[in-house]
Amino acid sequence: MGSIRIWSEAVSASEIAARLGITADRQFERGSLMSPRNPASARRKSSVWIRQSGLSNNSDLADHVRALLGLMGGCREELARLSVDCEMDLFLGFSSGNGQGGCVLPADLVADVAALGLDIVLDLHPPAAPENC
């Protein structure tokens, strides 16, 4: 899976969406409940804007990155302006059924991510332990 995440204590999620001209798949405003079903839950310290690649979780990570770069490619200048008050990253999740595997992110693709000012976060999920252990 792949997504772009932008969060800020100063800029609202709705303002991030408006400035980028891209609707979030998920967004949360600063001060909103972490768990809306639990009125006693903690409140968010930052606004969060998340846009997913739209690809299947079985797609290659490089394809997720390409899809997200295609979506965000025209936003380079606005991302630079947002970076003053926002944290931003390209979030990639990876798991395999047997604990083995990997991916290649070509250098030109990584350079394109860097040109947008995005950090890359790899979220690795090991396989679940067998129930008989």
Image (cartoon, rainbow, N blue to C red):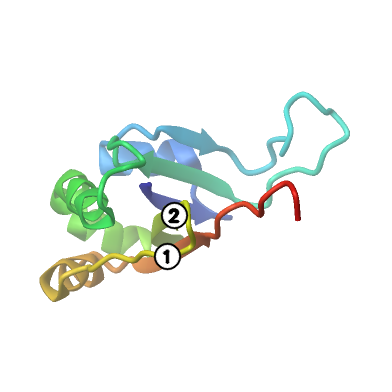
Q: Is residue 123 visible?
A: yes
Q: Nearer the viewer, residue 57 or 86?
A: 57
> Where is residue 89 drawn, in percent x and y?
40, 61
In the figure, is residue 18 to the left or right of 42? left
Residue at the spot 37% in from the left edge and 69% down from the top edge: 119
Is 67 displayed left or right of 20 in the figure? left
| Total residue callouts | 2
- In this view of the protein, which residue sits in the foreground, 120 or 83? 120
What is the crowding at mark 2: few (fewer than 14 residues within 10 Å), some, or many (at least 20)?
Answer: few
- Mark 2 is on which residue type? Ser
Disc 1 and disc 2 in contact, CB within 8 angstroms: yes
Q: Quadrant of residue 55?
A: top left
Mark number displayed over residue 6: none
Disc 2 element: loop
Q: x%, y% of residue 127?
A: 55, 55
The x, y position of residue 103, in whole percent, is 28, 65
Identify residue for label 2: 96
Q: The C terminus is located in which quarter?
A: bottom right
Element under label 1?
A: loop
